[in-house]
Amino acid sequence: MGRIQFSLKNIDNQYVIIANNPTPYFVSFGQIQLQSQQKNYLIAQSMDMMTGPFSTRPYYFEQPPTSLKGKFTVSYIYFDDAGNQVRNSQPVMITL
């Protein structure tokens, strides 16, 4: 699978994680969280945690952060074609 890209964006005064799927495949997430040195922020679970091919999708936090400073990492679990959980993480940048 190609690399999913994440960004952190403030939309209507609320931070969201934007997943960008540049691949021709659906990506189904089991969990997404934003990690900093001080705190972890979980994405609210929903029945549809899938990002379609060649698309972007916002994911909203259970308890949105009010302000973000410093370095952040997005840790996530997705399911491969055999249904196995695959863990990965990557640095994320805040975009305005």
Image (cartoon, grey):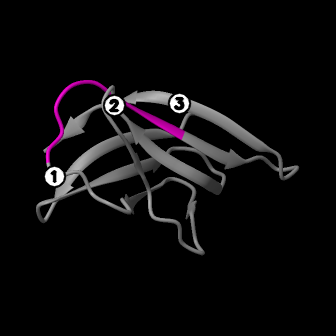
Residue 32 numbered mark, or none: none
Residue at the far bottom: name it. 47
How would you rate the neighbour count of disc 3 (Cα within 10 Å): few for under 14, some for 14-19, many for 20 or more? some
User: Identity of the amino acid at label 1?
Assistant: Thr
Residue at the far front: name it. 38
User: Start and end of the magenta stretch?
Assistant: 67-75
Find disc 1 in the rendering and name its residue. Answer: 66
Label 2 residue SS: loop
Is residue 28 positioned above or below 72 on the image? below
Distance from disc 1 to disc 3, alpha carbons, whole Å, reads 23 Å
Examine the structure image and report whether residue 23 is included in the region drawn in magenta: no
Find disc 2 in the rendering and name its residue. Answer: 36
Q: Residue at x 66, y 36 (%)?
A: 87
How would you rate the neighbour count of disc 2 (Cα within 10 Å): few for under 14, some for 14-19, many for 20 or more? some
Viewer-side residue, 52 vs 94: 94
How would you rate the neighbour count of disc 1 (Cα within 10 Å): few for under 14, some for 14-19, many for 20 or more? few
* Residue 13, horizontal then vertical, whole percent: 11, 61
